[in-house]
Amino acid sequence: MFRLIKKRMNMTDLTTEKALTFHIKAECSRTKARTSVMTLPHAVVETPVFMPVGTQGTLKGLAPQQLDDLGCRLMLGNTYHLGNRPGDNLLEEAGGLHEFMKWKHALLTDSGGFQMVSLLALAEITEEGVKFQSPHDKSDMMLTPEKSIEIQNSIGADIIMALDDVVHSTVTGPRVEEAMYRTIRWLDRCLKAHQKSHCQNLFPIVQGGLYPELRKKCAEELIKRDVPGFAIGGLSGGEEKSEFWKMVTLSTEILPKEKPRYLMGVGFALDLVVCVALGCDMFDCVFPTRTARFGVALVPTGQLQLKNKTYKRDFQPIDSSCSCSTCSRYTRAFLHTIVTQEPVSCSLLTIHNLSYHGARVLDLCDYSDASN
Amino acid sequence: MMKFVLQSVRNGCRIGVLSEACPKIEMESPLCMLYNRAGCVPYITHDLYEKISGLPSVVQMPSNLLLEHSDTVRDFGAGIKKFTAMENFIVYFHPQDSACAVPKGYNDSLGISIWGQGGKKKLNAEQYMDVVDAFQPDWFQALADSDTDQDSTKKRIRRSVERTLEYLDQCIKRKEQSDHLKNASIIGVLEGGHSISDRIASAKETARRPVAGFSIEGFHNFGPDTEAFKISEIEELLRVTILELPEDKPRFLSGVYNPLEIIKAVKLGCDIFESTYPYVVTERGCAFVFDLDTWENKKPEDPPNTASFEVSLKNQMFQNGFVPMLKGCTCYACQNFTAAYIYHLLNTSELLGSLLLMIHNFHHYFRFFEVLRRAIAADKIIEFEEHFERINSQPKEAN
């Protein structure tokens, strides 16, 4: 699929004290795909990498050891949720999220802005920040770029995100341009507020909706700032695929090669393949873990809704080519008896779905002949 | 085939060795079995079993959530152990789940009522044995009518005794005819409600049958509320029952029993128990905290370490408890995570919270049985019992 050419590593970079180093191991001769090694304070991560989402300081139904056994070295936490419960003060007291949840590898937190806008009915974007009603006591609150960074500093993730003015990808008109410029202004405020650049890497986010000239302008501005990596946001919200890919490739054309590119909220297996080819290195999506809770297992041919009577007497494993602990022990028929009924089924399917996703990403790193 | 050898009796407590040929396993009794729901250990996947020290070799599989899948298991053709990936365990299959209350008054001449996800099923002995035949467990309880309690009429009690014996004979006959169950061990059920004479009759008659062990039931209708049930209330009933039983066959006592009640039952001659109690405690967000380490060195007048067998991790006092749930506990949860984290998980309804509590509670309960066996062997069972009496009699705080 990809024809990768190995690069020579620059040995001096290995001795740096930066919070993030990024070495490209091999680059595809025909696409923008590359495999790299990203060194973070808590882990060495091979990219392309899919990051599972542990929203509230846990990956649903799995102990950290199990995630470790699956080969996961970088996972997400959500600032909005963690800021509410257990709260940034408590996390600070606990010594950070790593210590609280006993995750010894790397963490990435988002800024809290996206959840705020999508979850809260009365969130209002102002120049100052995101104004909203506290979900607990309905009092007026404000998430500013400074506050977002402060919370993320307390959480202590290896990679943190700048607060961006994110608009849904299907929004059109002047709002998109306004959001794009505000994102840049908020980035500068985030950079100023960031207290821990020696151990936490702040990534800005390219916005601009589906307008090529806005995306271009945004990316060009962001690369003027001294940051260790970049994210591409505001996509995978239901827009046309052709538009989606155009915006991704446009961004990766401008973003520097030698820094990691994180495509937020992506995604399904096919999207991963395409976006790796377009030059992205990092991905996150709730889909594999969320769908496990509803009894859905991911397979090369699509999905199995294991609740379905079709599987009542299906004595194969979920995927006979999968080597995860679920597939090596259980049949579809057995899983059919427990999905959505016994909580342990959620863990069993999560293990499979993450293993599946991880294997897909590994496939993308394989050497392949030009003829394939 | 199950084999039980009684090694000694001290203060009424039996020390025995229970063994099984295939898989080749030997266990000391008194012991407890590993509770399963729908063929799974609650919350805990296979790869985490090694995290629970003292994991029992026997898994108890109540039929309630499995009956509706018996056709599937039959078609699978290799038995319930392979179906549920439990081949390394001894599997004990039995009709009722003691963690779930069984509604009264639903057994009749057509069969015994068992409640699953799809509602009530009624099984007679033939139908039950069809399921047992498909499941191919190592041990299984005969179908029984245990629907009696302290309020039952004489008529109801007598019915349950007679029907249970009829079912036992039918089950034994079916077992002898079945290729799959040639080496399985059948456990006879002792009934009699709260009537001394009926208890004696049931025990005498059952002991005449070729069973591998006995399960004593019919005191109540199971369920989490039976946690409050006192063995002292049925002491005489248990005594007269056990007098009729041979010493070389184990006695199962099913139910949700805390350590104090377990000790009392062991002193009366019971050998095998369930681990439904840790499950019930986990479901309410609580963790065991009863002391198993310093009781030997305490004087009678010393207060116990805790005022209760458990604490609720949902209590806000744990919100910034950056210490293990139980100091000194060697379980995976306490060695790695703080009470504050588990509080957070429960507060946000995260599955990992129940998972960690379940590991802790199983670990602690299985340790209790280990300490129990040592206490019996060292002739310290009275002190051990007093230790739990002291915890029990402490004034309780609101949880």
Image (cartoon, grey):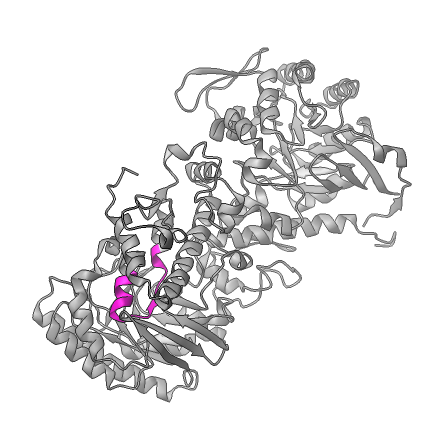
Q: Is residue B274 magenta?
A: yes
Q: In this view, does B209 lie above or below B395?
A: below
Evaluate whether residue B162 shows in this view: no
Q: In this view, does A72 lie above or below A249?
A: below
Viewed as shown, does residue B116 lie left or right of B242? right
Viewed as shown, does residue A264 lie left or right of B82? right
Q: Quadrant of the N terminus of chain B?
A: bottom left
- Work out which residue is located at the far top of the displayed protein and give it: A127
Residue A354 in the image: x percent, y percent?
A: 61, 49
Quarter of the image where one finds residue B47: bottom right
Q: In this view, does A32 lie above or below B37?
A: above
Residue at (41% x, 76% y) in the render: B18
- Work out which residue is located at the far right of the displayed protein and give it: A8
Which residues make up the magenta segment?
B262-277
Q: Is residue A295 magenta?
A: no
Viewed as shown, does residue A159 lie left or right of B139? right
Residue A69 in the image: x percent, y percent?
A: 63, 52
Viewed as shown, does residue A62 lie left or right of B195? right
Residue at (60% x, 32% y) in the render: A237
| A172 or B133: nearer the viewer | B133
Q: Quadrant of the C terminus of chain B?
A: top left
Evaluate whether residue A18 shows in this view: yes
Q: In this view, does A350 lie above or below A152?
A: below
Residue B233 in the image: x percent, y percent?
A: 16, 61
Residue B213 in the image: x percent, y percent?
A: 32, 78
